Amino acid sequence: MISKRTGFTLVEVLVASTIGVFITMVSVGALRAIMASAEMVDSNINAAAEVRFAANMISRDLQNLYNDGNIENTKFIGTVEPLEQDNYTSYLIFYTTGRTKARIDQPEGDLYEVEYYLMQEGETSSLMRRLWPNPHEELEPGGILTIIAENIALFEVQYFDGEEWSEEWPEEMQALPDLVSISIAAKQPDRSNPPSESIIVNLAGPGAGDVSILEGGEATADSTESSE
């Protein structure tokens, strides 16, 4: 009488184990790739949101630029300063008006001095906003310093005087620029095209206060004419 064989041979067990290990390795690799991709997407979304938030805040302050018609009462200064690792930043200082108080329990008017610049400490770079309630020319500049965007690689401001663009607008100009271009880019070394925002704010003439959004281009006279 022939007996029936039950169970598996050693060869069958080894083959099944090898296939199982291979499937597990492929599954783990795919899961890691999906998780890395999700983390990258989240990082890109967060970086784009911070850049957009900062650009919107600066454009809003520029739209509320204080100008009573007398340039002596209107503060607007733009400079460029060096940073670490051969980098640089624009410094933009001006008077703006607002109804939201910077300090809840302190008396304030609606006139504020606001300053924007990039602060770099080692590998970390942040876009800063200094808001000074009740500014006074006889006092040292002060106010509330806030980080409005982190991991920023570029903060560049340009000024258009009606004929050409320049990177600085000294106080000696005794006038406001016609247009102000703001460019902000996130710091993402692993991406060839990191999130960025470029806007142009009109400060003079018809349509003062209008904001134009540039699609990844630099602020030039040609782009200004096309945006009009």
Image (cartoon, grey):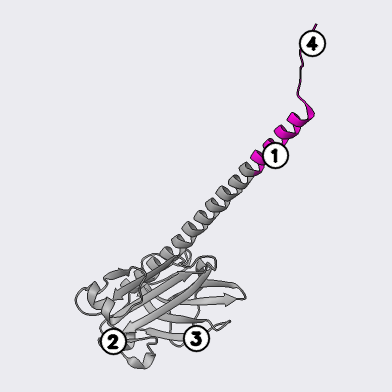
For mark 4, what is the residue?
3
Say which quarter of the image contains residue 79: bottom left
Residue at 29% of width from left, 70% of height from top? 211
Q: Are marks 4 and 2 in contact (CB under 8 Å)?
A: no
Mark drawn on residue 161: 2
Say which label, 1 or 4, has the lower sequence index.
Answer: 4
Residue at 26% of width from left, 70% of height from top? 210
Question: Disc 1 residue type?
Answer: Val
Label 2: element kind: loop
Taking the view exactly as shown, the residue that stands out farthest to the left is 206
Residue at 54% of width from left, 68% of height from top? 189
The part of the chain drawn in magenta is 1-25
Residue 137 in the image: above or below residue 42: below
Label 4: element kind: loop
Say which label, 1 or 3, has the lower sequence index.
Answer: 1
For mark 3, what is the residue?
81
Question: Disc 3 residue type?
Answer: Glu
Distance from Cα at disc 1 to Cα at disc 4: 33 Å
Image location of residue 69, percent across then percent down: 25, 83
Q: Are marks 1 and 4 in contact (CB under 8 Å)?
A: no
20 part of magenta stretch: yes
